Amino acid sequence: MSDAKHIDAPLRLFNSLTRAVDPFAPIDPGHARVYSCGPTVYNYAHIGNLRAYVFVDTLRRTLLWKGLDVTQIINITDVGHLTSDADAGDDKMEAAARASAKSIWDIAAHYTDAFKANIAALNIMAPTEWTVATDYVPQMIAFAEKIAATHCYQLDSGLYFDSFTVPDYGALAGGRDDAAHARIDPVAGKRNPSDFAIWRKSPPGEQRQMEWDSPWGKGAPGWHLECSVMSLDRLGHPFDIHTGGIDHREIHHPNEIAQNQAYHQAYCGCTDAVSGFTGARWWMHNNFLVDRQGKMSKSKGGFTTLFSLIDAGVHPIAYRLLCLGAHYRSELEFSAHGLAGALTRLKRLIMGVEGLKARAEGVTWQSPRLDYLRANLHPKLIPLLEQFDAALSDDLMTPRAMPLLEEAIALKKVPVDEKLCLIAAFDQALGFDLLTLTRADLRITPKDAQIAPDEIEAELDRRTSARADKDFAASDAIRDALIARGVEVMDGDPLRWDWRLALG
Ligand code: AMP
Ligand code: ZN
């Protein structure tokens, strides 16, 4: 029996509002409400975008680990996001539709499905609900009507939010930066550079694929409006945690906060009480995945997708592991080398768990909750449980938590079912699916492989015979022929993988 007091580390999360790691408690005891900015579905997600959702999933799994229920919303942006995050440029969806001569609705459906396939492949838990921006246009208009008289002004191009009508505009970004807005956002007639569109009127004579009637003319909502409206509708304001990539800390989220404050003011009839009201208590941001070869820009194209990694023979969970190997607030540099290392680490984990499962034949184990573990775990495993809980509770320190999984697998003189019980619990928090994945699952044949696995095995058998006959010339020739066809031959590989296809 263990002492539960030592295991429950207080959960602390970095809040971009305070720029500090603060103790977290949900507004409703026992239940956390989370809203995550979702993808803009005019193209495939690149692997950088997906890092944002691995982070969100780690947050969700940590809240569950801490015994909280979680309601989580992820939105699908299918209207309103312009080619700049502010008000400049064209709607990304309209531009994609023009470029491909397809309807926006078809484009949105295709890339939404692709995004959900990526999420499933990365073992990211589906949110409680996906909300789609175009389903919420009437609510967006109603929200805008509520704040229009007090916080907005009209121009020929639409309805704009006056950023001087709320206190501390831009505090989340570290303060108002009108000079930066002026550089990116040259909309004629705006009162202040950081003012932003609530409603964009369709230009005269231009027929858009997506437009709606509104009190400010036919047009489409500004991008920031959807997240204020959908979070309010599905979670209520204030809710607990709002997430997004670090880029959203600069424009999108400050604008959401300004809208939330304005709406709150209109709703409660209060005048100066909105300064501390931001709509969500925690604003959390993942740092970027960066690629020195510049393959991380959705709008420029030519970027790396999860599909392209799978086509190159990499199991998607290796990418998940790569992400969790860095803290979510650190920049992570992507490289083929780093990804190959993550794949090897995943293989080792799976081999370790496969070994334990083979020894535990006939014994059942479960994926227990923390309270079960506290009460029942073998004393030798308790320090690992404590350290794991402390790492996750310390602002989701996955790089500190992952080696504890490896330690648990390697630990000697502990009954195998006890170990599996702890490993299952760790795995539930990290989401690698280690108890189900097999080594065979990891062997993904690259799409452009010039040789099939059966043929490689046959060639290697021939090589083994040649070596047994001491015919080293023949053995070397077989090996060279395999290398020429993209097969790396790995004699004496400790993971017992005799070969692998070189990553594309
Ligand atoms: P988008 O589909 O462009 O709206 O972006 C979806 C999510 O990906 C947002 O939360 C972005 O902040 C985030 N994001 C964009 N680029 C990266 C990157 N390179 N690394 C991590 N997150 C990113
Ligand atoms: Zn958003």
Image: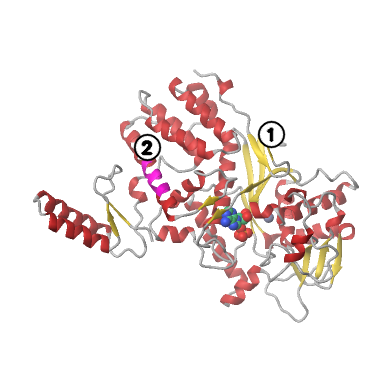
Image quadrant in which the C terminus is located = bottom left
Residue 474: which quarter of the image?
bottom left
Q: How is the image coloured?
A: secondary structure
Task: Tell me residue 491's x, y (percent).
Answer: 24, 48
Q: Which residue is mark 1?
A: 25
Return the residue nearer the eye: 334 or 244: 334
Rendered image: mark on residue 290: none
Residue 459: which quarter of the image?
bottom left
Q: Would you say residue 38 is visible in this rendering?
A: no
Residue 298 relative to residue 19: left or right:
left
- Residue range highlighted in magenta: 341-348
| Residue neighbourhood size for the residue with mark 2, other residues' Cα within 10 Å, grouped as few (<14), some (14–19), many (≥20) | many
Element marked by disc 1: loop
Work out how far the residue at label 2 is from the one at label 1, CA to CA, in angstroms. 35 Å
| Residue neighbourhood size for the residue with mark 1, other residues' Cα within 10 Å, grouped as few (<14), some (14–19), many (≥20) | some
Magenta span has 239? no
Residue lying at 52% horizontally and 27% vertically, measured from the top left: 386
Tag 1 or tag 2, which sits nearer the N-term?
1
Q: Which residue is mark 2?
A: 353
Magenta span has 345? yes
Tell me the kind of residue under disc 1.
Answer: Ala
Residue 192 relative to residue 479: left or right:
right
Residue lying at 77% horizontally and 61% vertically, measured from the top left: 179
Q: Main secondary structure of the magenta part?
A: helix
Indicate if the residue with disc 1 has its beta carbon within 8 Å of ligand 2. Answer: no
Tell me the kind of residue under disc 2.
Answer: Val
